[in-house]
Image: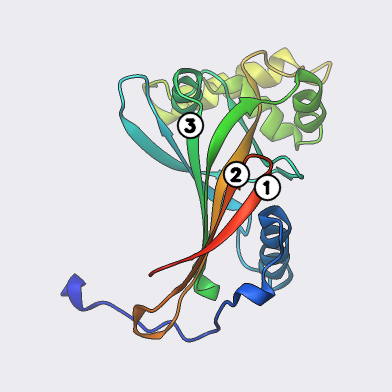
Amino acid sequence: MNIADYRREYTQSGLDRKDLAANPLEQFEQWFKQAVDSDYPDANAMVLATVSADGKPSSRTVLLKGLDNEGFTFFTNYTSAKGQDIAANDQVALLFPWLQFDRQVRICGTVAKISAEASAEYFHSRPLGSQLGAWASDQSKTIASRQALIEQMDEATERFKDSGPATPANWGGYKVIPQSIEFWQGRESRLHDRFEYQLIGEKWQLNRLQP
């Protein structure tokens, strides 16, 4: 297979300035709802990019678990690799690759922990297995085998057999507060529609970008 020859045209639709909301978070909510309503698999999956203290970038897929007029919320282990990156550098980026619709949304901004109370509320809404898994896994650390991981899960299950798991001290939510949000719609001949909102002071400025 010649990878360079692998291509397709993007012909589903276009994107016009007149159709965009004044607030990018409202525009995102519209696109997100369209993805959810069409049963797009894992519509809330987003790529989170971070940078470590020594300038090394990394990315991984996490799940969007909250959206409000301030930003985008996800949950993770605070001592994981991404948590350590965030502790050293609060500049992050998100990417929603809705390829089925020839769309993507790029978000750049800062990230901060949400309150312990909000984290606990979400933690206790999760399935029991997910709660136990947060206790069983020392995320991003090496482990000898799958069996060792299963044993850690068994230990967590035994520990909390008589009461529900408490929220781990090293687990909780982050909110990404956007400084720029770009909406990308694929078009024929690679003449894609790209619109970028930038936060200038307290107002969003919208510009069309060249593809």
Residue 27 in view of the camera? yes
Closer mark to the observer between disc 3 and disc 2: 2
Marks 1 and 3, Cα distance to the nearest angstrom? 20 Å
Up the image or down, 176 lies above or below 137; here it is below
In the image, residue 93 lies at what x, y percent?
Answer: 48, 42
Q: Nearer the viewer, residue 126 or 72?
A: 72
Quadrant where the N terminus sits is bottom left
In the image, residue 127 lies at what x, y percent?
Answer: 75, 37
Marks 3 and 2, Cα distance to the nearest angstrom? 17 Å
Q: Which mark is residue 203?
A: 1
Query: Residue at the spot x=60%, y=44% of the render?
Result: 200
Say which residue label 3 marks.
91
In the image, residue 168 lies at what x, y percent?
Answer: 68, 16
Query: Residue at the spot x=71%, y=13% of the render?
Result: 159
Q: Nearer the viewer, residue 66 or 164?
A: 66
Q: Quadrant of residue 36?
A: bottom right
Q: How is the image coloured?
A: rainbow
Marks 2 and 1, Cα distance to the nearest angstrom? 5 Å
Q: Residues within 10 Å of mark 3 (few under 14, many from 20)?
A: some
Q: Which mark is residue 200?
A: 2
Q: Amino acid at mark 1?
A: Lys
Up the image or down, 35 lies above or below 15; here it is above
Q: Quadrant of residue 162?
A: top right
Q: Amino acid at mark 2?
A: Ile
In the image, residue 9 lies at what x, y percent?
Answer: 38, 84
- In primary-sequence order, the first of circles 1 and 3 is 3
Secondary structure under tag 2 reads strand
